[in-house]
Amino acid sequence: MKITYKGDYALKTILDLAAHFGNGPVAINDLSRRLDIPTKFLEQILLDLKRAHFVESRRGKIGGYCLSRPPAQITLGEVTRFINGPVEPIACVDKKYSGCHDIGKCVFRDVWAEVNRSTARIIDNVTFEDLLKKSKKINKAFTYQI
Amino acid sequence: MKITYKGDYALKTILDLAAHFGNGPVAINDLSRRLDIPTKFLEQILLDLKRAHFVESRRGKIGGYCLSRPPAQITLGEVTRFINGPVEPIACVDKKYSGCHDIGKCVFRDVWAEVNRSTARIIDNVTFEDLLKKSKKINKAFTYQI
DNA sequence: GTATACTCTACTAATATAATAGAGATTATA
DNA sequence: TATAATCTCTATTATATTAGTAGAGTATAC
């Protein structure tokens, strides 16, 4: 797994929206300023997140973005996989891989599959509600706090 | 973590050399043919592995490459990290990262650090002797067998 | 002395990443 | 209804990474 800037931005954006869940839409400009993400880049990321139904949007004067689901129902794994692709450390864990002449002979495959499982076990069990609680605990004056 | 073709080739090369450990040098051409790796690309990879002291070389008519250490003393983690960089899924696990305004506030950091630890625990405990034994068990007529 | 095999540096094509740019569509509200 | 604020969409660009190619040079066994 590799987390790119785009992925990092997406996660921070979802966390910010989680902190504002239930309080109406948040404008791109606000997110951009608060999270220090280039506005035009964030626009694209939000459109991607919208197409994947992580967020919903509203246009016009009081427009903005909000989460489609409660923070407790969005996991770190889901968002990470959506932005940065599969968690597998190598393609051959995937069923379609044809890089090994005889897949049964590739002794590395099992190790990568184990890495994959152990990573998934971690990131699929962390929700944005968990992250939100944690962030509030870490710092009472946390920026994301409502 | 992301395993590139270069990394994949390096691991397969080390495994092949492990299978021939103690039997004199193996020529690049033999490795290239057996493992189906572009010869000139493999040359570069072997030079890298040599600089990192994973392999030793001998020039001339009966030249070639061999492991610097017994297969039991080389782990999958060492080689993987050398070729593909740190195992961390994101830069901020690294001490030098400055992407978060307040590192203490980044709630994702702990999760990535956990992914890092769990991955390391796996790949640092697999040696090339382990992989060799496994490959022999899987297929008695395995190509890498001496 | 020559064939064989490693050594080293440079170059290239394709793809991914991280933006930037600008015109267009929608909506609240004065 | 005009308009300002806001999201929507497509195209373009700069940089880095990846995977490979090319060719001249060096060492060694025989």
Image: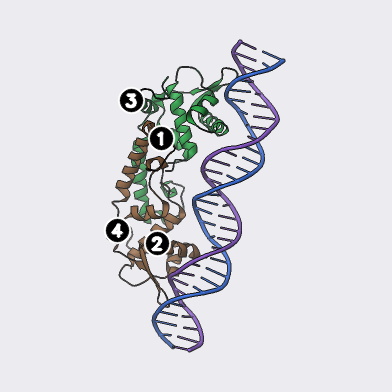
Chain colours: A brown, B green, C blue, D purple
Q: Of the residues shown, which amino acid type is indicated by label 1?
A: Gly
Determine whether the residue tagged by mark 4 lies in a helix, strand or loop. Answer: helix
Residue C8 falls in image quadrant: top right
Determine whether the residue tagged by mark 2 lies in a helix, strand or loop. Answer: helix
- Looking at the image, residue A63 sits to the left or right of residue B65; the answer is left
Q: Of the residues shown, which amino acid type is indicated by label 2?
A: Leu
- What residue appears at the point 46 percent right and 24 percent down from the top-left corner? B17
Q: CA distance from mark 1 to mark 3?
A: 22 Å
Tell me the crowding category of disc 2: few under 14, some 14 to 19, or many 20 or more residues within 10 angstroms, Cα based.
Answer: many
Viewer-side label of 1, 3: 3
Q: Of the residues shown, which amino acid type is indicated by label 4?
A: Lys
Specify whether disc 4 shares its chain with disc 1.
Answer: no
Residue A94's spot in the image, x, y percent? Answer: 38, 43
What numbered label is drawn on residue B77?
A: 1
Tell me the crowding category of disc 4: few under 14, some 14 to 19, or many 20 or more residues within 10 angstroms, Cα based.
Answer: few
Query: Which one is in front, A34 or A77?
Result: A77
Q: CA distance from mark 3 to mark 4?
A: 51 Å
Q: CA distance from mark 4 to mark 2?
A: 27 Å
Residue A51 falls in image quadrant: bottom left
Label located before the other in sequence (1 or 3):
1
Determine whether the residue tagged by mark 1 lies in a helix, strand or loop. Answer: helix
Viewer-side label of 4, 1: 1
Viewer-side label of 3, 4: 3
Q: CA distance from mark 2 to mark 1?
A: 34 Å
Label 1 lies in what chain?
B
What numbered label is drawn on residue A137?
A: 4
Query: Residue at label 3?
Result: B137
Residue D1's spot in the image, x, y percent? Answer: 48, 89
Determine whether the residue tagged by mark 3 lies in a helix, strand or loop. Answer: helix
Query: Which one is in front, A102 or A92?
Result: A102
Specify whether disc 3 shares its chain with disc 2.
Answer: no
